[in-house]
Amino acid sequence: MVVIRGATTINRDDKEEIKRAVKELLEQIANVNQLIKDEIVSIVFSSTSDIHAYYPAKAAREAGFEGCSLFSAQEPDIHGGLSLCIRVMIFVEKDIKPRHVYLRGAKVLRKDIATVYSVAIDGPAGSGKSTVAKRLAADYHIHYLDTGAMYRACALCVVEAGLDVSDEAAVVDLMRTVELEVEYENGVQKTIVNGRDVSEDIRRPAISMAASAVSKHPSVRIHMAEQQRQIAGKMSCVLDGRDIGTFVLPDADFKFFLTARPEIRAKRRYDELVAKGHTVDFEELKAEIVRRDEQDSTRAVAPLKVAEDAVVIDTSEMTVEEVVSTIKQRMQERI
Ligand code: DC
């Protein structure tokens, strides 16, 4: 017998919300763990004390999970706990490594028994990582962590402070005084530096090269990787970056490495920047991408490279849709 755990949150105490959330949670758990309903022995729910509108167990039965025993209970009101949260424990007759599922901001309470899963997507600039990672996270209702944004935020601080990006000691000293936060608003990551939302500023082309330069410093990398591990340890996440599968989370459950020909990657970045109103020279952008690849791949600590157990996907001739469905298919094969 194996126990799978999961949790989700709802927006308001409403019967239809509860039914939707329970169905989504159970279907995700079944999907990620490749369960057929007959393998489920029983399902136990607990919900926070602010949920009254419907029994999660009843919602589960109505969602088609009816051949097993079902039970719901209400949790005591714990100060500071999550509100409007439904937790579940599913007992299954199957010899698998359970994959626990935490959706819509619900967090793991018992990290010792509940492992969350992580999807690492590494690759060079313009390989399609962030578009694909965002889509995957949205489809699986898990968090998306753009680790490049953290290096970019660091670079922005260094540039605005007029410091030299290659001066490791100065960069680290500055980072110690900066409060870098990653927040989520409607599932979209916002990068906040000392309370200021820098999500747009960090996308400026000048910051890309500076981010690559500051990311070379071992002490900066160690600091960032620690923060990234903490986030990924708390909730299921899709992380994109350069070193997720090799350094940040060498035990990530799923690892992908996206790549594409340099001219294609430059064209994608060009279109993205032009759409945002930036004026850019295509040839210059292409040269910068090649330089950045070189810098990211040759640094001494955690360089951009393919993890031994990563699935490599050349996205040059693929649509976003094709890449996303290839990744989902590979994930299904692995579980
Ligand atoms: O993915 P991006 O273009 O936003 O990343 C900007 C730079 O940050 C990239 O050139 C190298 C660095 N970076 C890194 O070293 N490790 C990561 N995990 C993510 C980004």
Image: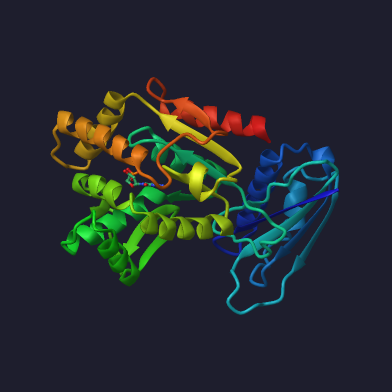
Q: Is residue 319 above or below residue 295?
A: above
Q: Is residue 79 above or below residue 230?
A: below
Nearer to us in this view, 175 or 41: 175
Taking the view exactly as shown, the residue that stands out farthest to the front is 300
At which x and y percent is residue 239? 48, 46
At 42% across and 60% down in the image, what residue appears? 223
At 67% across and 69% down in the image, what residue appears? 48
At 68% across and 36% down in the image, what residue appears? 335
Image-based side of 53 in relation to 189, left or right: right
Image-based side of 105 in relation to 261, left or right: right
At which x and y percent is residue 166? 24, 54
Q: Is residue 281 above or below residue 30?
A: above
At 43% across and 45% down in the image, what residue appears? 302
At which x and y percent is residue 207? 23, 49
Nearer to us in this view, 240 or 88: 240
Instruction: Choose top left, top right, bottom left or bottom right for residue 37.
Output: top right
